[in-house]
Image (tube, rainbow, N blue to C red):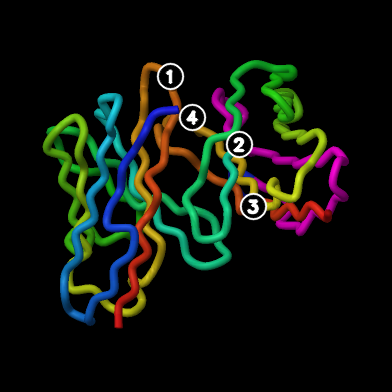
């Protein structure tokens, strides 16, 4: 079982819709969770981090964490074509300082 | 967010040569920096953890004698790919850890092509 799992996609949504990206992780002791956006050929850009159960909102982005289910998600409201990118879920696994990444979900927002 | 500067952004070299990549944290002190590698259509894979003033910690399968890491100051870590071969061609990305915020900020990455 991979430590961090994501559906590779592509996830295709129309412009203006809500995009929902999901991630599960295997280490129950993990405490820190991150969403990065990566455009093709570029390095990852931090979008959100979340440490506590529940929702965290920042502009059009909402991160949701459910530690009991070992599940973290990212919602993007009013999706724009410029949101089209690969979204990487990352976790700091117990006993490590580095990020462990999922394989990423490619999002396509159709104009 | 904090700024991590990485250069060069792109390098082409001949097989057998060495390439040095620099990673600088510009507005915070990064006692720990991480080096990742990303092959096409794959996710980032950690290569090593760079600790200021001490030896780097390498992930399993990463040759420490081939990928030399130096972290001589709180703001600079370097990765030297020695005797590069075509299979080393990849996208190398560093990150600086702002431990106060428990957040990692990434450099822009270096695309290495070994001919």
> Looking at the image, which residue is at 59% across and 20% down?
A51
Q: Which residues are magenta?
A: A5-34
Marks 2/1: CA distance?
15 Å
Cα separation, mark 4 vs mark 3, equals 25 Å
Q: Are marks 3 and 2 on the same chain?
A: yes
**Dot 1 falls on which chain?**
B
Q: Residue at x 70, y 46 (%)?
A: A83
Residue pointed to by mark 4: A94
In the rendered image, which residue does mark 2 sit on? A35
Q: Quadrant of the C terminus of chain B?
A: bottom left
> Which numbered tag is attached to residue A86?
3
User: Residue A8 colored magenta?
Assistant: yes
Q: Which mark is residue B101?
A: 1
Q: Are marks 4 and 3 on the same chain?
A: yes
Mark earlier in primary sequence (4, 2): 2
- 10 Å crowding of disc 3: few (<14), some (14-19), many (20+): many
Would you identify the image quadrant in which residue A36 lies? top right
In this rendering, position of residue A17 left or right of residue B30:
right
């Amino acid at each position: 079982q991979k430590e961090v799992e994501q559906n590779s996609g592509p996830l295709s949504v129309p412009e203006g819709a809500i995009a929902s990206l999901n991630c599960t992780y295997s280490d129950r002791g993990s405490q820190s969770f991150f969403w990065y956006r990566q455009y093709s050929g570029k390095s990852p850009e931090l979008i959100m981090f979340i440490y506590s159960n529940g929702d965290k909102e920042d502009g059009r982005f909402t991160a949701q964490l459910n530690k009991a289910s070992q599940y973290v998600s990212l919602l993007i409201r009013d999706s724009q074509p410029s949101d089209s990118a690969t979204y990487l879920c990352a976790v700091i696994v117990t006993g490590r300082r580095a990020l462990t990444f999922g394989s990423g979900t490619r999002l396509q927002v159709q104009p | 967010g904090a700024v991590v500067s990485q250069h060069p952004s792109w390098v082409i070299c001949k097989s057998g040569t060495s390439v040095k990549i620099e990673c600088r944290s510009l507005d915070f002190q990064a006692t720990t920096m991480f080096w990742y590698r990303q092959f096409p259509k794959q996710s980032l894979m950690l290569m090593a953890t760079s600790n200021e003033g001490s030896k780097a910690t390498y992930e399993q399968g990463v040759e420490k004698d081939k990928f030399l890491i130096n972290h001589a100051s709180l703001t600079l870590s370097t990765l030297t790919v020695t005797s590069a071969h075509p299979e080393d061609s990849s996208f190398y990305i560093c990150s600086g850890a702002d431990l106060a915020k428990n957040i990692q900020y990434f450099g822009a990455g270096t695309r290495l092509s070994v001919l």
